[in-house]
Image (cartoon, coloured by chain):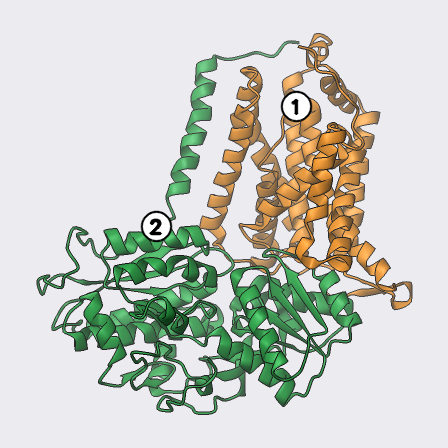
């Protein structure tokens, strides 16, 4: 059973990756009731832009993160203007699904043109030598610790921002009632744009963080985007804490199933859980039941 | 402060524009246009004039995790076709025209692509594909259309196995098939290195699972049962559970059946767990995306290889490497998948010889010519003397296969083939 700590750690690292992306779903859902289905592709573009800057052109890793931040902001604005705003204006429940998915496909095609279709190695800025913890019982890559740490910092600071600043309170207000918020003089459009910028930036930065573990390439976002969406549903789309828990549950579930049941059934329990949650508690494990008035 | 809403119409049209763009992008990039504009309305009866090119289909994955193999194979075929055309073409002056199609490594797409090649493009033969599943999903069409299908990379797909259902078999193989590969892997790990406890890690594709089953058989012949059999998915990034299990069961070596990126995750995962045992696996351990992504962790991995770039077995092979590097200028002078490139090159050379000997590009005559090739063909891998016969469609003999080893970003020779070059005609392995 000495394997257990190692297994938990790799499950947590994997779960934090899902949680980071799922957190992005949570932010936009709160303010605009829409999701960005191109989230996985934004992660991929963040990773590839940082790869070009830090690895191909051999600049600093931080500059790579900067590049990812920039591309995140640009993508968010494009997305918000072309997909979300029209959908909100026409009060359409489906057009944003199509439009964000479409933008994701465009992003992937562009990436395939620019970077090709191969997977590349993105060396970790912290080196690839694993650290031994707890007297050698656990070996962990520095990058995994960085992911766990950075994900926690990003999510905590967003919660602090939401609770402690005027702008953050405006986000909460928009999340609660758009029309009332507008009547109070809150610029709802700005808040929605802001939430897309934050979620896209998180996705792009997540790409830079996970790249060294997963290899980077135009196809890297597809699976992560789907897994993160499942994590968000399990935890509850409306709860910041919930999506983190959802990510961790999914990550640990995968690792434990692979180890103790069968590697072939690795993804099954997570998705069984997803179906159970949808059946029994549709708002998610941590979500508040909401009654939609028509 | 209420938000200002500009006119709706403008916005709608913008959303539509985005969708239209998606559809457009989805369609472009799927098809590589053939090099010369040929007419597709021509019957394949061989009654074409001397000016018409001879159309040859080339299918493989030119995108995704298998693309190093697909692109190398395609470039190898292109190189051979170019040499043949520069030397005057086939059938007294007709040029070879390659019709290239991307099967995207998916079975459905492969079945579509081959029907396009056979029915619309009327090719005289098809070279390719890379993926076992694609070949298995597509062989029915050339068998029924009676057009030779030369499998020049896929190692798992059936060739001689077809004789039972199709006595008039149109599928040929120019590859080290998985019967041969699994036998060689077991030979290297058990007979030569003397491991008693081995774990098998294979991906969940047709290729991985077919190879895993054959590997188990090869081990059984040596009275060895693997201590652990693990599975993983394409794009899996964490192999901790599989490796822990293998380690806990005392594996002395890990035998692999997968493709580059995931194999790299196995090598990297071993380094992370601080558990280093040799990796012995199928030929895909020579893929550039394994070697690059695993870095130093990939050193020492050994695999069967029909062709090693540093040690071409024939003068034609040496020339081939020079020309390939000069023409395509691959990164670090390294062919992404030398095995695929060499097999692609050789398959085109053999096909051209068969076209000349048949005196026609009629697919049925081509098959007969392939089975009775009169002149030896100088390929990159071997000098092929009568590579195929009426009851054996496998060109590569087990004793022509080397064992290669990954060393500092290259594949080097570990154990040379029992017989270097062609000539030996003793069927073994399958």
Rendered colour, chain B? green
Label annotation for residue B31:
2
Q: Which chain is orange?
A: A
Is residue A232 shown to the viewer in this render? no
Q: Secondary structure at mark 1?
A: loop
Q: Nearer the viewer, residue B126 or B285?
A: B126
Q: Nearer the viewer, residue A134 or B368?
A: B368
On what subunit does the disc labeled 1 rest?
A: A
B39 over B159 or under it: above or below: above
The answer to whether A276 appears left or right of A192 in the picture is: right
Same chain for the residues at labels 1 and 2, yes or no? no
Is residue B76 shown to the viewer in this render? yes
Tell me the residue at 59%/33% (across/down). A76
Q: Quadrant of the N terminus of chain B?
A: top right
Q: Position of residue B351 (x, y in %)?
A: 26, 73
On what subunit does the disc labeled 2 rest?
A: B
- Residue count near mark 2 (Cα–Cα under 10 Å), binned few <14, some 14–19, many ≥20: few
Label annotation for residue A87:
none
Q: Secondary structure at mark 2?
A: loop
B419 over B339 or under it: above or below: below
Q: Position of residue B81 (x, y in %)?
A: 26, 69
Label annotation for residue A33:
1
- In space, the residues marked 1 and 2 are separated at their CA atoms by 39 Å
């Amino acid at each position: 059973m000495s394997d257990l700590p190692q297994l938990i750690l790799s499950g947590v690292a994997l779960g934090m990756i899902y949680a980071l992306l799922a957190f992005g779903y949570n932010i936009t859902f709160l303010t605009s009731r829409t999701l960005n289905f191109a989230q996985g592709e934004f992660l991929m573009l963040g990773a590839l832009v940082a790869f070009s800057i830090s690895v191909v052109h051999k600049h600093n890793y931080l500059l790579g993160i900067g590049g990812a931040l920039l591309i995140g902001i640009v993508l968010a604005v494009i997305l918000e203007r072309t997909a979300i705003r029209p959908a909100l204006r026409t009060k359409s429940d489906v057009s944003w699904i199509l439009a964000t998915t479409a933008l994701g496909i465009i992003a992937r095609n562009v990436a395939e043109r620019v970077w090709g279709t191969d997977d590349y190695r993105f060396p970790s800025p912290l080196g690839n030598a694993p650290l031994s913890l707890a007297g050698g019982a656990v070996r962990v890559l520095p990058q995994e610790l960085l992911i766990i740490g950075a994900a926690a910092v990003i999510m905590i600071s967003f919660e602090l921002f939401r609770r402690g600043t005027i702008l953050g309170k405006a986000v909460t207000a928009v999340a609660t009632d758009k029309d009332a918020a507008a009547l109070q003089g809150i610029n709802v459009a700005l808040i929605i744009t802001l939430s897309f910028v934050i979620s896209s930036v998180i996705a792009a930065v997540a790409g830079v963080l996970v790249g060294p573990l997963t290899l980077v390439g135009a196809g890297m976002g597809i699976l992560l985007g789907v897994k993160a969406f499942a994590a968000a549903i399990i935890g509850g789309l409306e709860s910041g804490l919930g999506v983190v828990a959802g990510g961790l549950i999914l990550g640990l579930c995968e690792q434990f199933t692979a180890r103790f049941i069968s590697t072939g059934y690795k993804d099954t329990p997570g998705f069984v859980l997803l179906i159970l949650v949808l059946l029994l508690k549709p708002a998610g494990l941590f979500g508040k039941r909401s009654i939609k008035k028509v | 402060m209420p938000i200002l809403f500009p006119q709706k119409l403008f916005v709608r049209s913008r959303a539509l524009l985005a969708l239209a763009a998606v559809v457009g992008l989805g369609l472009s990039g799927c098809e590589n246009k053939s090099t010369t504009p040929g007419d597709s309305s021509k019957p394949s009866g061989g009654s074409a004039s001397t000016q018409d090119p001879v159309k040859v289909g080339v299918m493989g994955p030119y995108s995704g995790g298998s693309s190093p193999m697909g692109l190398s194979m395609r470039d190898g075929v292109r190189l051979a076709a170019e040499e043949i055309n520069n030397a005057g073409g086939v059938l007294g002056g007709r040029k070879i025209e390659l019709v290239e199609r991307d099967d995207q490594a998916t079975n459905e797409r492969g079945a579509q692509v081959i029907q396009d090649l056979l029915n619309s493009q009327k090719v005289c033969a098809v070279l390719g594909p890379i993926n076992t599943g694609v070949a298995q999903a597509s062989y029915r069409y050339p068998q029924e259309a009676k057009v030779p299908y030369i499998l020049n990379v896929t190692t798992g797909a059936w060739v001689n196995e077809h004789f039972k259902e199709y006595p008039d078999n149109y599928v040929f193989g120019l590859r080290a098939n998985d019967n041969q590969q699994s036998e060689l892997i077991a030979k290297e790990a058990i007979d030569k290195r003397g491991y008693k406890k081995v774990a098998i890690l294979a991906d969940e594709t047709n290729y991985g699972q077919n190879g895993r089953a054959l590997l188990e058989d090869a081990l059984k012949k040596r009275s060895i049962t693997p201590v652990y059999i693990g599975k993983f998915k394409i794009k899996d990034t964490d192999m901790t559970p599989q490796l822990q299990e293998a380690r806990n069961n005392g594996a002395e070596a890990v035998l692999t059946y997968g493709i580059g990126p995931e194999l790299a995750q196995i090598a990297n995962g071993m380094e992370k767990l601080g558990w280093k045992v040799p990796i012995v696996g199928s030929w895909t351990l020579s893929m550039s995306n394994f070697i690059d992504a695993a870095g130093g962790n990939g050193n020492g991995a050994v695999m069967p290889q029909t062709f090693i770039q540093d040690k071409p077995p024939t003068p034609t092979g040496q020339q081939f490497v020079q020309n390939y590097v000069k023409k395509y200028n691959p990164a670090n002078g390294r062919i992404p998948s030398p095995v695929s490139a060499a097999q692609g090159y050789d398959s085109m050379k053999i096909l051209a010889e068969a076209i000349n000997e048949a005196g026609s590009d009629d697919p049925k005559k081509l098959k007969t010519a392939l089975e009775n090739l009169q002149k030896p063909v100088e390929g990159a891998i071997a000098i092929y003397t009568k590579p195929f016969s009426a009851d054996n469609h496998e060109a590569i003999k087990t004793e022509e296969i080397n064992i290669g080893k990954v060393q500092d970003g290259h594949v080097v020779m570990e154990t040379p083939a029992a017989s270097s070059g062609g000539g030996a005609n003793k069927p073994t392995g399958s």
